């Protein structure tokens, strides 16, 4: 896959039986693979701020790490059938979150990678929501040529 990619990240939280919230972000990113680990790096803006947050997503099929540095700082580790705790630091203070990962699925093709993570989210040791994270990475050229048809 090329270095210049497009990234789609979809997050879905189930807070109750009929209560779900969905969020999707599509952005340009950089992709590379080193020592059997995939990396996607991108920057995101936070509403109401000029500061950018640098995001690094790293995965190898067994674990997925998400690191944010900037206005928000966090290092989230998703490991199948394991709970990891971390501090989610914002300009307004820190929140202790727990990530109890149920499943990580990775589908790789030559110019496209899909990653799905199913996990439970805790805040201060209290269950907050059941969540799904879907990430789709594809080469920019593939997207441009597909749209041009």
Image (cartoon, helix red, strand yellow):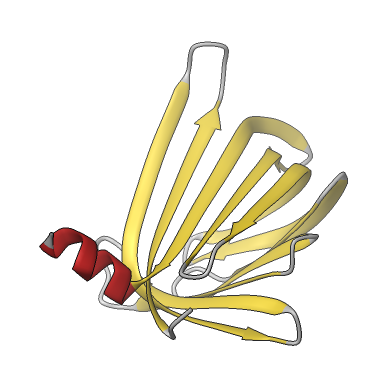
- The answer to whether residue 96 is left or right of residue 139 is right
- The answer to whether residue 20 is left or right of residue 107 is left
Q: Nearer the viewer, residue 68 or 41?
A: 41
- Image location of residue 132, percent across then percent down: 58, 39
In the image, farthest residue toward the front: 149
Q: Quadrant of residue 145?
A: bottom left
Q: Is residue 127 visible?
A: yes
For image coordinates 27% across by 60% down, the residue present is 47
Q: Quadrant of residue 6?
A: bottom left
For image coordinates 27% across by 65% down, the residue present is 143
- The answer to whether residue 14 is left or right of residue 103 is left
For image coordinates 48% across by 18% down, the residue present is 19
- In which quadrant will I find the C terminus? bottom left
- The answer to whether residue 87 is left or right of residue 100 is left
For image coordinates 74% across by 60% down, the residue present is 86
Q: Nearer the viewer, residue 121 or 143?
A: 143
- Image location of residue 57, percent across then percent down: 58, 70
Q: Quadrant of residue 84?
A: bottom right
- Image location of residue 5, percent across then percent down: 38, 75
**Above-or-below relation of 32 to 118:** below
Q: Is residue 69 visible?
A: no
In the image, farthest residue toward the right: 82
Q: Nearer the viewer, residue 91 or 139?
A: 139
- Image location of residue 2, percent across then percent down: 43, 83
Q: How many marks?
A: 0
In the image, farthest residue toward the top: 18
């Amino acid at each position: 896959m090329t270095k210049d990619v497009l990234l789609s990240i979809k997050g879905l939280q189930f807070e109750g039986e009929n209560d779900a919230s969905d969020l999707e972000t599509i952005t340009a990113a950089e992709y590379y693979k080193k020592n059997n680990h995939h990396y996607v790096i991108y920057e995101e803006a936070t509403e109401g701020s000029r500061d950018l947050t640098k995001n690094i997503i790293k995965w190898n099929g067994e674990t997925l790490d998400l690191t944010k540095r900037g206005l928000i700082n966090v290092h989230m580790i998703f490991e199948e059938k394991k709970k990891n705790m971390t501090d989610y630091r914002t300009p307004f203070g820190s929140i202790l979150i727990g990530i109890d990962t149920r499943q990580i699925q990775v589908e790789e093709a030559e110019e496209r990678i899909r990653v799905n993570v199913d996990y439970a989210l805790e805040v201060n040791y209290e269950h907050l929501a059941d969540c799904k994270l879907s990430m789709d990475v594809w080469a920019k050229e593939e997207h441009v040529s597909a749209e041009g048809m």
